Image: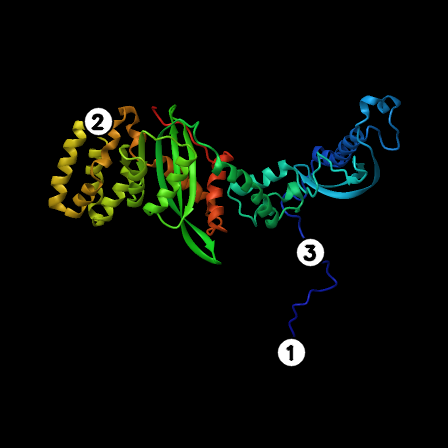
Amino acid sequence: MTSVSTKPDSSQPAAETSPALFDDWFDPVEAGLRERVRGFIEEMIREELDTVLARPRYGRRQEASLGAEDAGAVVGHRHGSRERSLTGTFGKTAITVPRARLEQPDGTTTEWRSGAFRAYQRRTLAADALIAGSYLAGTNTRRVRGALSTLFAGSVGKDTVSRVWRKVKSDWDAWNARPLGDEAIFRLILDGTVVRVRLDRKATSMLLLVVMGVRADGQKVLLAIKSMGSESAEVWRTVLDDLIKRGLRRPEFLIVDGAGGLEKAIAAVWHGVPVQRCTVHKHRNLLAHAPERLYEEITADYNDMIYAATPEEITARRRAFLRKWRIKHRAVADSLEEAGDSLFAFVRLPPSQWRSGRATNAIERLHEEFKRRIKTQTVLPSADTAAMLFWALLASGQISTRKVDCW
């Protein structure tokens, strides 16, 4: 009987492992630069210390520096060096940092700290910006290591990405507290979107409430992003009160998604301001009240009404829509009547602005870009992270806003 063995034959050479893609790429310019980076950084730090002590290493002060004009000069002495590692856009390198003790007026001494190379610094700001930019571009924390492995030689992992991302929070906090008194806001667009976040170790749906303004010159600007649990009147009132507290002036026109809580909050703080109900949201509502076989007919009649050329034509087609659908499918007509005149508030604007004044499309586009960005993560670490990520995508330029068309 013949036995079958899976043990490799030691007489034959083992197959060589082929290098990964890009592993055998060599660039003499990059290699030469990285070899010289260490010496450049060390020389920069040494020169900084020489300037503080007013003498080079193993040197003495010039006699002129001992005059009355320099009586307050720093006095101190070097005492060795220490090894530090630094990761930058040039990769990871080890550098030798000189140490020194500086004498204080009370006779004590303190450790000298370099201004160029901060205490406990492990990465340059440019490297942190590159890591954060990769994360914002859609790479999740675990995949950043692979995406930047060639540049950083594997020294960046998911924990590093998380630490870098936490540094963004100081800018986020400052943005949330910035005064709005100097913003000449003509129009506000308010809407919400649902995101999945981790809460008490469980995936939970949370709402991001977004407020976007349109300046007097037509430029769109993000004003607020809040992570909330609902779209109730109390929740929206909290968002609006915060904007007013920071100096936001009364807008001249509002565009909303149709949430009842939002309309109540607006009535409480800005009574009398024209409010436009988003025509896109209302179209979805109409379809939700009808069987699928009527979708095409409802859409055709609705578009004829909404996109009519004059206010008179809009009024006539609105009446025709209600007459027809009260008979054909009353739930559709009732849904249109529920919106009332707020669905047609855009006619108060100049005709050139009707297109931008009908819907919350400016925020809807941001929602789409945001969800495209987070689809690699499915569930975000926390509700605060979701709001901060939405803001960072715009603040970093990953998503841009432009002026309103035909302003």
**First in residue order: circle 1 vs circle 2:** 1
Corner quadrant of residue 44: top right
Lateral position of residue 401 relative to residue 114, left or right:
left
Residue 398 visible (yes or no): no
Between label 1 and label 2, give the one nearer the viewer. 2
Front residue of 315 and 107: 107
Count the labels in the image: 3
Lateral position of residue 341 relative to residue 186, left or right:
left
Image quadrant in which the N terminus is located: bottom right
**First in residue order: circle 3 vs circle 1:** 1
Image quadrant in which the C terminus is located: top left
Tell me the residue that label 2 is attached to. Answer: 309
Q: CA distance from mark 1 to mark 2?
A: 92 Å
Front residue of 176 and 90: 176
Q: CA distance from mark 3 to mark 2?
A: 74 Å
Front residue of 401 and 4: 401
Where is residue 38 drawn, in percent x and y?
76, 37
Tell me the residue that label 3 is attached to. Answer: 15
**Mark 1 nearby-residue class (10 Å; few <14, some 14–19, many ≥20):** few
Q: Amino acid at mark 2?
A: Ala
Q: Secondary structure at mark 2?
A: loop
Please report contact status of discs 1 and 2: CB closer than 8 Å, yes or no.
no
**First in residue order: circle 3 vs circle 2:** 3
Lateral position of residue 119 relative to residue 397, left or right:
right
Where is residue 134 drawn, in percent x and y?
55, 41
Q: Secondary structure at mark 1?
A: loop
Q: CA distance from mark 3 to mark 1?
A: 30 Å
Q: Amino acid at mark 1?
A: Met
Tell me the residue that label 1 is attached to. Answer: 1
Please report contact status of discs 3 and 2: CB closer than 8 Å, yes or no.
no
Residue 336 visible (yes or no): yes
Q: Residue at x 28, y 28 (%)?
A: 354
